[in-house]
Image (cartoon, rainbow, N blue to C red):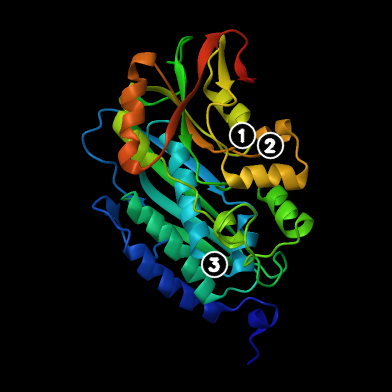
Amino acid sequence: MTDRYGAVGVHLDLAEQAKRRIGELARSTRTALALGQIGAFGGMVRVPPGLERPVLVLSTDGVGTKVLVAARAGIHDTVGEDLVNHCVNDVLVHGARPLAFLDYIATGKLEPDVAAALVAGVARGCRAHEMTLAGGETAQLPDLYQPGRYDLAGTIVGVVNEPDALHGDRVRPGDVLIGYASNGLHTNGYTLARQIVFERLGLDVADPFPDSDRSVAQVLLDVHRSYAAAVTPVLTQVHALAHITGGGIGGNLGRVMPDGCEAVVNAGAWPWPVVFRVLMRAGGVSLGEMRRVFNLGVGMIAVAARDDVEAICRAAEPAHVATWVIGEVQAGRTGVRFAER
């Protein structure tokens, strides 16, 4: 009998093959809090003991068009790790520790090797944070995705004791802004970055990236840094955290400024990584747009009392994350302002 579903582009045998491989990867992430069977309709994890008022912190995100660079380079595992680290940072800003993760892969025709590589990256990120990959979905959608194209998204569940949750309400004038170094683009601005690198500069993934000793693929596929190791030891000393993603410093730091507090960022307080200088110059991108689109070398910002700055910066050293004092909070119009030097 004719395989009608396969004839229209959905191959169930490939899906079963991918699921078996993904199941093995998910099994490698199970923690003592994991419950239930791999492959069940829903994933289950226990809430950690010892929390008087546990609050679940949830976030969903993707890696955007960075997946197009991964597909072009034939390197698929790094974007899986990107996805986990991005989501870990998003719950970290509320003081939460990660509990469980769910991934979603959508593609035209499922390629088991590609799916396994994507989930291998996800599983690696989960293991690094002692987090269970509790489930997910792999969808074949040939009418939506061109051959060789896929999308990748994920949902994280974290937990924090309610009295310890960070909301930004502890921020006060006189607090100091501490910037944590990014290691590149992370997962934002890739639509503009790809246009500049592949079209305007005419480069491909194997070509040397300008002003560096690395290839285009190496620079553009640097894994989105997780700040969990650098920040978690000093969460009780932090008044607020901002993960610098789409919208840049202005669009994200402003989200944790309470009424009457203005974050004044010293624009020259940290060095820009090479990738941003190249994109600005080669793309003819204005400084204002660079600040709105990219992280510019700062992937996380902590807001803290001046007396705690030294301890907070020192805590990042074992994680090999550079930090800088990049400004302060002043009384004024709520939001973010850059002070040029």
Instruction: Tell me residue 218's x, y (percent).
Output: 55, 59
Q: Which residue is mark 1?
A: 248
Q: Is residue 67 visible?
A: yes
Q: Are marks 3 and 2 in contact (CB under 8 Å)?
A: no
How much space separates mark 1 and mark 3, taking CA atoms? Answer: 27 Å
Which quadrant is home to the C terminus? Answer: top right
Picture quadrant where residue 162 is located:
top left
Q: Residues within 10 Å of mark 2 (few under 14, many from 20)?
A: some
- Between 71 and 318, the one nearer to me in the picture: 318
Please, what is the three-letter code of the amino acid marked with disc 3?
Ile
How much space separates mark 2 and mark 1, taking CA atoms? Answer: 8 Å
Residue plotted at (52% across, 54% down): 222
Tag in front: 2 or 1: 2
How much space separates mark 3 and mark 2, taking CA atoms? Answer: 27 Å
Q: Are marks 2 and 1 in contact (CB under 8 Å)?
A: yes
Q: Is residue 163 visible?
A: no
Which quadrant is home to the N terminus? Answer: bottom right
Instruction: Tell me residue 179's x, y (percent).
Output: 48, 30
Q: Which residue is mark 2?
A: 290
Secondary structure, mark 2, is helix
